[in-house]
Image (cartoon, helix red, strand yellow):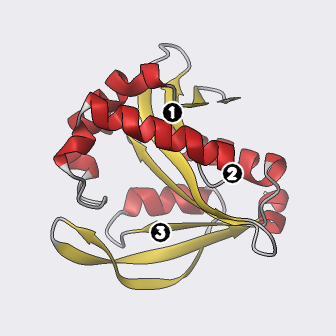
């Protein structure tokens, strides 16, 4: 599955992406690790990423989550990841979005464009009613990305994720389909 934007495109991962995926997550470990859970060392291997890609593809088939690579439209290089996960159907019709952009591409609008693309897919294709996101209070750039996309701060999740041995509190943001349609 491919979603095309102005400067980037989102594509679901294939096993052939494992090497590039391993490279980007390893290179960005110090940068992304400030905001992500503590992953086992096997996560940073090609074999670990092949396992993850298979898990991602299974999740797509089940309608539970969608994991996309963010690719530069000019070079076709992987420059980030964006996921729609914890999808709940039935009367909930909701999901959670998370994203990570290569440090070299931060501050260039990649996060905002990729978020807008996945929101279009979420609300127009999947017909979900609500998307939420969690962000560390100190991650001002990510908060700006969410706000540019129309997300509203809804609350605080205290000590919600173990990051580098410390329980971290997150801000909870949300966006409704009816709000998205007005943007």
Residue 86 position within the rendered picture, expressed as x and y whole percent measured from the top left: 58, 63
Q: Is residue 50 left or right of residue 97?
A: left
Residue 107 position within the rendered picture, expressed as x and y whole percent measured from the top left: 41, 42
In the image, residue 52 above or below residue 160 = above
- Which corner quadrant holds the C terminus? bottom right
SS label for mark 2: loop
Which residue is label 1 attached to?
Answer: 70
Query: As drawn, which residue projects farthest toward the top?
Result: 75
Residue sitting at x 82%, y 56%: 127
In this orientation, which residue lies closer to the viewer: 125 or 154?
125
Mark toward the viewer: 2 or 3: 2
**Circle on res. 147:** none
Residue 101 position within the rendered picture, expressed as x and y whole percent measured from the top left: 40, 41
Of labels 1 and 2, earlier in sequence is 2
Residue 151 position within the rendered picture, expressed as x and y whole percent measured from the top left: 62, 66
Cα–Cα gap, marks 1 and 2: 20 Å
Cα–Cα gap, marks 3 and 1: 20 Å
Which residue is label 2 attached to?
Answer: 63
- Residue 65 seen in this snapshot: yes
Which residue is label 3 attached to?
Answer: 134
Residue sitting at x 45%, y 76%: 171
Location of residue 47 by image quarter? top left
- Tell me if mark 2 has few (under 14), some (14-19) or many (20+) residues whose alpha carbon lies within 10 angstroms of its own: some
Of labels 3 and 1, earlier in sequence is 1
Of labels 2 and 3, earlier in sequence is 2
In the image, residue 92 above or below residue 142 = below
Residue sitting at x 25%, y 54%: 39
Residue sitting at x 56%, y 38%: 57
SS label for mark 1: strand
């Amino acid at each position: 599955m491919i979603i095309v934007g102005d400067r980037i495109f989102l594509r679901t991962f294939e096993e052939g992406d494992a090497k590039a995926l391993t490279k980007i997550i390893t290179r960005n470990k110090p940068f992304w690790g400030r905001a992500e859970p503590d992953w086992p060392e096997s996560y940073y291997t090609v074999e670990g990423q092949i396992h993850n890609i298979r898990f991602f593809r299974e999740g797509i088939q089940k309608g539970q989550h969608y994991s996309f690579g963010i690719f530069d439209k000019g070079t076709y290089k992987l420059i980030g990841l964006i996921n729609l996960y914890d999808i709940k159907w039935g009367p909930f019709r909701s999901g959670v979005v998370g994203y990570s952009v290569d440090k070299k591409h931060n501050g260039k609008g990649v996060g905002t464009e990729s978020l807008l693309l996945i929101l279009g897919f979420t609300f127009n294709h999947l017909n979900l009613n609500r998307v939420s996101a969690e962000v560390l209070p100190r991650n001002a750039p990510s908060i700006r990305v969410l706000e540019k996309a129309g997300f509203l701060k809804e609350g605080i999740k205290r000590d919600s994720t173990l990051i580098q041995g410390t329980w971290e509190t997150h801000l909870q943001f949300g966006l409704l389909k009816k709000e998205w349609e007005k943007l």
